[in-house]
Image (tube, helix red, strand yellow):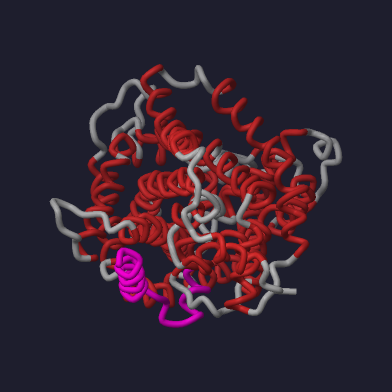
Amino acid sequence: MLETLLNKSQTSQNEERMAWGSTTEYYLSLIGFAVGFGSLWRFPYLVYENGGGAFLIPYTIFFFILAIPLFYLESALGQMYQQSAPVCLEKAGKRFRGVGIAQIFTSFSLGGFYNILMAYALIFLWKSFTWHLPWEIEQDPNSPTGQIWDYNYFYKEILQRTDSISDLGGFNSSVVIASIVSFIIVYLCTVNGLKTTGKVVYVSAPLPYILLFILLIRGLFLEGAWDGIKFLFEIDWSKIWEFEVWYRAANQVLFQYAVAIGGLHALASFKEKTTSIIRPSIHIPIIIGLTGILCGFTVFAYMGHMANVAGISMRELPLQGPELVFVAYPAALTLMPGAPIWAILFFLMLYTLGVDSEFTFLETVGAYLEDEKIKFFGRTPKIQVARFVLVAAFFLLGIFLYTRAGFYFVTLYDDYITIIPYALIATLECLIYGWISGTDEIKALIWENVQEKYPPAFILCIKYLALPVLVIILIGSFWQVMIVKLFTYPIWGIGIGFCFTGIPVSMIIYYYVKYKNWKCEEPEEKKTTIELINYA
């Protein structure tokens, strides 16, 4: 009787679960999710900082041994089990459920973090609707060289930045308003789950590409543009032997291809079980990689023109993280006729890059809460209410980001959210599905439902190539965050950072210890049947 009730409950749950309206919606959502800020500013900056083509060599290697195999694994888990990351990981053993919950928490943290960058883009977009861009510096016609970018406009006018992270300086009203506007847009686009998100991505996913191509074509005709693009591919052979270049390349692959944060599980869980897994798991990473190159071409074309106008070398340009898109690139736009039009296009593109990622963070956390039948005040909320609560929670999570010391917290959040959790979760996924358990069952399910083989090359990568690389990255991440940057922030700042890193780590440990000796109650006959399916 109990088994019958459980089966009915599971059937009911599957019937209620949202689904993509078409394969195109799934593809567009995947592209929008993974192609974000990591492609536009982080990838070009890391190439610039780590020897140009010398960085592209390890990056390409890790694309094949990390990005594609992990992308496939997480997509297969979500599609076969039709559940969010915690349930998928639990199928390999209840003690691994914490690995999935760590992914949900990381997505939740990123949801609060990403919005502040989108808010900055909205502020610049609003400021661009003028005949004279407010950050433009008047050049002295009698001087052959000069300063052509304005740090003060971003740090003093937009951020109103204080002298240190310890001086919060109160809330920055323009940043607060922009953040609220951004969250309202995100809420309206996700209010009915996939019913609205699946339609919005038809605009939000391709729009950045259209704008990127427009900006690139314009940039190619600027004087000095090809010198900038050439710099992108020049190999500094002295860098190729530095461990930091390889470490940063591997870390960028994890971040840029959006593995280890539960989003791929969630998006794939809304697919039909019988649709192909291998095709999107190869097509989408290739698109993401090519998008990074496209962003690199676009950014370096404008930076080459800026260096030409200023009469300086590429090495003297302010290409550092967020400064790339909020200082250097806006300055480059002022050098062209019709600068406000190009600024509007650029910051509109920047916002749409972030908004698609924000959709998926919201759906990842939302899908988990809905799969778990989480109740508020004893009731299961309607999806519109649940999405509103999540948006409000994302907003509150970023509360320190809206102060005048907010940009210091941007660095802090980035250090503690995206480094250790990414590396740890990816390492454990490779360990679980490479050596401990789960591989035979997922192979059998893929063959049974899709009639596709789990590619042996991916299994070999996960077991023998990805795992040792990720262990090294994890050690390097721990050294970077817990040792090198330990005294970068005040004690209370480190405490906030440790929460972002410590909570997912503690969830992993908690579930492993609690269910270490837990045995699956599934009948042995069923397990044997699954394992013996001949998928070859």
| Residue 390 position in % (x across, y down) | 27, 53
Q: Is residue 38 magenta?
A: no
Q: Quadrant of the C terminus?
A: bottom right
Quarter of the image for residue 442 reads: bottom right
Q: Is residue 5 magenta?
A: yes
Horizontally, residue 409 falls left or right of residue 37, namely left
Front in this rendered view, residue 447 or 413 = 447
Horizontally, residue 514 falls left or right of residue 189, namely right
Q: Is residue 355 above or below residue 486?
A: below
Q: Quadrant of the N terminus?
A: bottom left
| Residue 16 position in % (x across, y down) | 31, 73
Identify which residue is drawn at 51% across, 45% down.
96
Q: Is residue 296 above or below residue 94?
A: below
| Residue 128 position in % (x across, y down) | 37, 58
Horizontally, residue 441 falls left or right of residue 497, namely right
Front in this rendered view, residue 513 or 285 = 513
First to last magenta residue range: 1-29
Outermost residue on the left side: it is 377
